[in-house]
Image (spheres, rainbow, N blue to C red):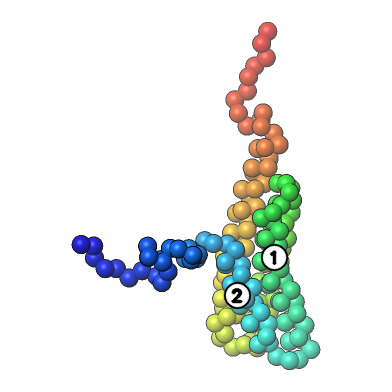
Amino acid sequence: MKSEGKMPAGSGPDNQTNKAPPVREYDLEERLLEFASVVIDVSDKLPDTRPGNHLAGQLLRSGTSPYGNHGEAQSSESADDFIHKMKVCLKELRETHRWARLINRKQWLGNDDQLAFTLREGEELIRIFKASLKTAERNRSINRHPANNGPRNAPET
């Protein structure tokens, strides 16, 4: 008889039909979706002032963009296209992080958990995208110059 352990809802063998697998922390699409969702909430909390509205719009545009652009990268037509779209995601994440830092500096939201999540998750996503781009660029270089990556054969004389 097996010991009864606690399992997340929907993860047991009886619940595997017609249900999506549980979301894992490394599921980048899900992380970007959650990031965009929280950014929307943070932008909605900003003060209804000229600077608050400006930053809300900037944060909203840059913070929701990576989710859509990542989808574009997933259906890229070439390695160059993939790298370009991933760089757009990275650029938007960096911009979002800057706006979030400014909002935090202004203390408009106090010690808001969603703003803290935006700052923390933004940093992690930036690291993930930088690493992914480094790998993609290395792979592109290998694929463009395959003769330079293996042992060299001396010409026969």
Q: How far apart are labels 2 and 1 at the CA level?
A: 17 Å
What secondary structure is found at the residue carrying circle 1? Answer: helix
As displayed, is residue 150 above or below residue 32? above
**Residue 10 placement (x, y as % from top left):** 42, 69
As displayed, is residue 123 above or below residue 43? above
State the residue in front, 79 or 123. Answer: 79
Which residue is under mark 1? 68
**Residue 61 placement (x, y as % from top left):** 74, 74
- Residue at the spot x=67%, y=37% of the render? 143
Which residue is under mark 2? 118
**Residue 9 placement (x, y as % from top left):** 41, 72
- Residue at the spot x=68%, y=82% of the render? 43
Give the number of the mark in front: 2 or 1: 1
User: Of callouts 2 and 1, which one flags the residue occurring earlier in the amino acid sequence?
Assistant: 1
State the residue in front, 54 or 27. Answer: 27
Outermost residue, bottom side? 48
